[in-house]
Amino acid sequence: MHRIPPRVHRTPSAHHRALLALLLTVVVLLSGCTTDTSAKSGPGASGGSPSVGASSPSGAGRDLAARYRKGGGDPGVYGITYTKGRGGSPVLTVWTRKRSGYGGGFDDFAKTLTSFLAGRGVDLAQGCVLTVYGPDGTTLHHYDTTLEQAT
């Protein structure tokens, strides 16, 4: 009689965790994305806290943006905050010095940002809501990748 060997459980290596984070980021970016800025505008429209000011990131938000820039992120970003929204998905708020947004480069910007945040432990498995504000507080982008719950 032939015996089947028992399964061995291994702890994932740093490379496997990085690959998993990258794959999750790609899934998040490709699942139900929208860059419609007219649908919801304003700091509280994305489901996040209405107390977030569209033109003034907090000190912690400025510090996080500095780490993002130092890590190779967009040099125009001067504020990044995130909170848990409905369903536990993160609500990301970004302030940039770009006056007209990211245009065709938005996907690359979003990928770089979400990779940076995932590397710092932000759980993006259920998607996220990303709102980008210009220097005058104008909504430049609204990006929703949250997974809709089937009822």
Image (cartoon, grey):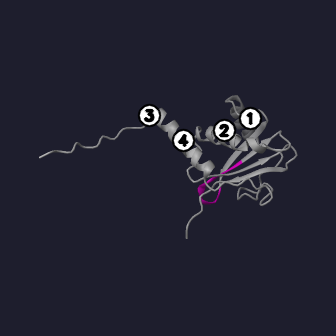
Type of amino acid at the residue the image marks with label 2: Thr
Q: Nearer the viewer, mark 3 or mark 2?
A: 2
Examine the rendering and report whether any part of residue 20 can be seen.
Answer: yes
The reply to whether the magenta stretch includes residue 88 is yes
x and y percentages locating residue 72 in the rendered image: 69, 30
Label 1, label 3: how many angstroms apart (C-alpha)? 29 Å
Packing grade of label 2 (10 A; few <14, some 14-19, many >=20) is: some
First in residue order: circle 2 vs circle 1: 1
**Residue appearing at x 63%, y 56% in the figure:** 32
- Spot the residue most to the left: 1
Disc 2 + disc 4, Cβ < 8 Å: no
Packing grade of label 4 (10 A; few <14, some 14-19, many >=20) is: many
Image-quadrant location for residue 89: bottom right
x and y percentages locating residue 114 in the rendered image: 64, 42
Label 2, label 1: how many angstroms apart (C-alpha)? 8 Å
Left/right placement of residue 133 relative to residue 91 reads: right
Examine the rendering and report whether any part of residue 123 can be seen.
Answer: no
Disc 2 + disc 1, Cβ < 8 Å: yes
Mark 2, residue position: 112
First in residue order: circle 3 vs circle 2: 3
Label 3, label 2: how many angstroms apart (C-alpha)? 22 Å
First in residue order: circle 1 vs circle 4: 4
Disc 1 + disc 3, Cβ < 8 Å: no
Label 4, label 3: how many angstroms apart (C-alpha)? 12 Å
Type of amino acid at the residue the image marks with label 3: Ser
Residue 21: numbered disc: 4
Mark 1, residue position: 74
First in residue order: circle 1 vs circle 3: 3
Disc 4 + disc 3, Cβ < 8 Å: no
First in residue order: circle 4 vs circle 3: 3
- Give the residues in magenta: 85-92
Query: Can you say whether 60 is above or below 83 in the image?
Result: above
